[in-house]
Amino acid sequence: MNTEQPLALLGGLTPKQFMKRHWQKKPLLVRNAIPGFVPCLGRSELVALAGEEGVESRLIIDSDKGWRIKHGPFPKRSLPPFSQKKWTFLVQGVDLHHDGVHALMQQFRFVPDARLDDVMISYATDGGGVGPHFDSYDVFLLQAHGQRRWRIGRNQDLSLQSGVPLKILQNFEAEEEFVLNPGDMLYLPPKYAHDGIAQGECMTWSIGFRSPQEGELARELLLGLADEAFDGVGDALYRDPKQPAAIAPAAMPPPLVDFARQAIAKALNNPHLIDSLLGEYLTEPKAQVWFDPVDDEPDVSAGVQLDRRTKMMYDERHLFINGESFRVGGRDARHLRQLANERRLTAKAVGALSQDAQNALRDWMSAGWMKTL
Ligand code: SIN
Ligand code: CO
């Protein structure tokens, strides 16, 4: 990706400028971020998606009796009538289900894939919204259809209302207010308070990010290290030729404690293993993703393209795809990194790969992770 080219998507900023000035720091309102934007997915398709098993969706109703929330799937006709005001439904991970939405998400790859999460799409009737709140992650809110009035502020007080089924700020104070039209977009950094209310029927696409939590990462990597530890650390037995006769037999011998600490230090002293576990974790498909294996003999000679649900990343030594890691080097590494970055590889580049790498491509195609270009 050319990071020095001014983009309409970023209001004329280059990705480099945007990341330096706004990312994780301050909001950016972009009028006409996608000029002439015509959403490739409408209300009825979104309703159909919200009815499917394995698609995460929520219905939020702002009624006289307060906020109500229901979780999907929503079978046909289980949503309130479209003539009823002040309700919204939100569908998570639409990029996994729709090529056009997935393609739009690719425009945001000036942020690393390891951080990009999904596209959530909301539909709201007049007055609908999810209340004043903050999110823990960065978000681009792209207005896809109709109008939404956003009020935003740097609330210092992030305390939440109690006794409501949603996270609603107790004391929301808006500092700025804008009405977004189709094609307009608002970027908000994490923890920036916001409240978006539909003015008439509206649809908003949220391009969202993931930010691994320290403790969660430590847990995941330690689980992986634990699996490898028995063979990786070795089978040396504790020896204690200098153990004096025990006066207090129940007391733990300090050298045994040191031996245990050293064993742990050995298990942790494997940076390449930590790197590969991290890549496997970050490319793990989402829980609701199932690939359909392909029966036909896979043919990669015409070039390949990744399935929209495939996650592929790399580091200096490894290539990661859908939770698996491979050691690669030389020309194979160059071309497979190109596949990860561009999500496609031409016939010529496939032809330049080693037999091992071509076999790996065939395996991935059989697994349904990629298809012919
Ligand atoms: C919405 O689309 O209604 C909510 C998006 C958000 O506030 O994060
Ligand atoms: Co939000």
Image: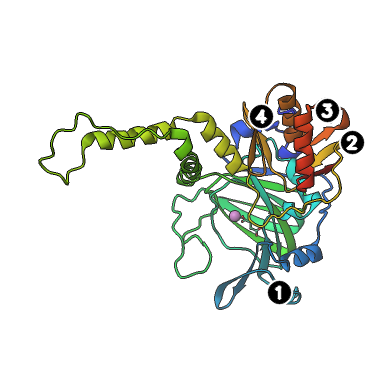
Quick check: which quadrant has ligand 2? bottom right
Q: The N terminus is located in which quarter?
A: top right
The Cα atoms of the two marked residues, 1 and 2, are separated by 45 Å
The Cα atoms of the two marked residues, 2 and 3, are separated by 10 Å
What is the quadrant of residue 116 in the picture? top right
**Residue kind at label 4, given as amino acid type:** Lys
x, y percentage for residue 16? 66, 29
Reading the image, the residue beneath label 2 is 302
Reading the image, the residue beneath label 1 is 79
Whichever of labels 4 and 2 marks the residue nearer the N terminus, that label is: 4
What is the quadrant of residue 57 in the picture? bottom right
Judging depth in this view, the residue of 271 and 8 nearest the camera is 271
The count of marks equals 4
Whichever of labels 2 and 3 marks the residue nearer the N terminus, that label is: 2
Whichever of labels 1 and 2 marks the residue nearer the N terminus, that label is: 1
Relative vertical location of residue 48 with respect to residue 106 in this rendering, above or below: below
Whichever of labels 1 and 4 marks the residue nearer the N terminus, that label is: 4
Q: How is the image coloured?
A: rainbow
**Residue kind at label 2, given as amino acid type:** Ala
Q: The C terminus is located in which quarter?
A: top right
Callout 2 secondary element = loop
Q: Is the Cβ of the residue at disc 3 closer than 8 Å to that at disc 1?
A: no
Reading the image, the residue beneath label 3 is 349
Q: Is the Cβ of the residue at disc 4 closer than 8 Å to that at disc 2?
A: no
Q: Nearer the viewer, mark 3 or mark 4?
A: 3
Q: Residues within 10 Å of mark 3 (few under 14, many from 20)?
A: many
What is the quadrant of residue 252 in the picture? top left
Reading the image, the residue beneath label 4 is 16
The Cα atoms of the two marked residues, 4 and 2, are separated by 35 Å
x, y percentage for residue 324? 64, 41
